[in-house]
Image (tube, rainbow, N blue to C red):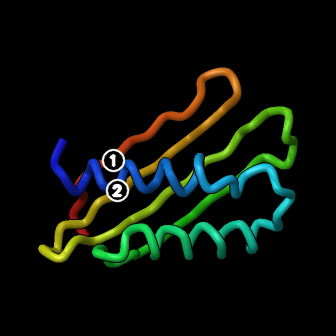
Amino acid sequence: MNENKEIIKKQLVYAVEDCQIMGNNLTPSKLRFIFDGLIKDLLSDFTVIYTAIIENPDEMQELYAAYIKVKDNNGITYKAGLSHDVNCGAYVTIDEVNG
């Protein structure tokens, strides 16, 4: 995996899993606002094109997912997603995309 993919993956996991924004009964808009700010700070060397995050309101299920689309300074665009559930843990994908 190239260095940019590793950086994006690491920071996505950090933003969602380690910053403890999940499970705080935040409104969807507040959760997205906080997540968007974290991603912009953590990936400041990239242009953030889009972010999305969703959480199941039932805390016992621990279901949530996040998605980001960013562009590096060479014009390469990446999309990355993280999904999590209580039974399987976190699963992360990242790909280079056209535009």
Which amino acid type is shown beneath numbered disc 1?
A: Ile
Q: Residue furthest left?
A: 74
- Compared with residue 26, is residue 17 higher up or lower down, i.e. above or below? above
Neighbor class of circle 1 (other Cα within 10 Å; few <14, some 14-19, many 20+) is some
**Rendered residue at 57%/64% (across/down):** 52
Nearer-N-terminus badge (2/1) = 2
Q: Is residue 76 left or right of residue 27?
A: left
Q: Quadrant of residue 28?
A: bottom right
Count every numbered label the image shows and give the total: 2
| Rendering quarter of residue 54 | bottom right
Which residue occupies the extreme top position in the image?
Answer: 87
Asked if residue 53 is positioned above or below residue 36 in the image, the reply reads above
The residue depicted at 50 percent of the width and 52 percent of the height is 14
Find disc 1 in the rendering and name its residue: 94
User: What amino acid type is highlighted by mark number 2?
Assistant: Ile
Q: Nearer the viewer, mark 2 or mark 1?
A: 2
* Rendering coords of residue 20 (x, y %): 68, 53
Q: Secondary structure at mark 2?
A: helix
Residue 22: mark in rendering = none
Q: Are marks 2 and 1 in contact (CB under 8 Å)?
A: yes
Q: Which residue is mark 2?
A: 8
Judging depth in this view, the residue of 53 and 1 nearest the camera is: 1
x, y (%) of residue 78? 29, 60
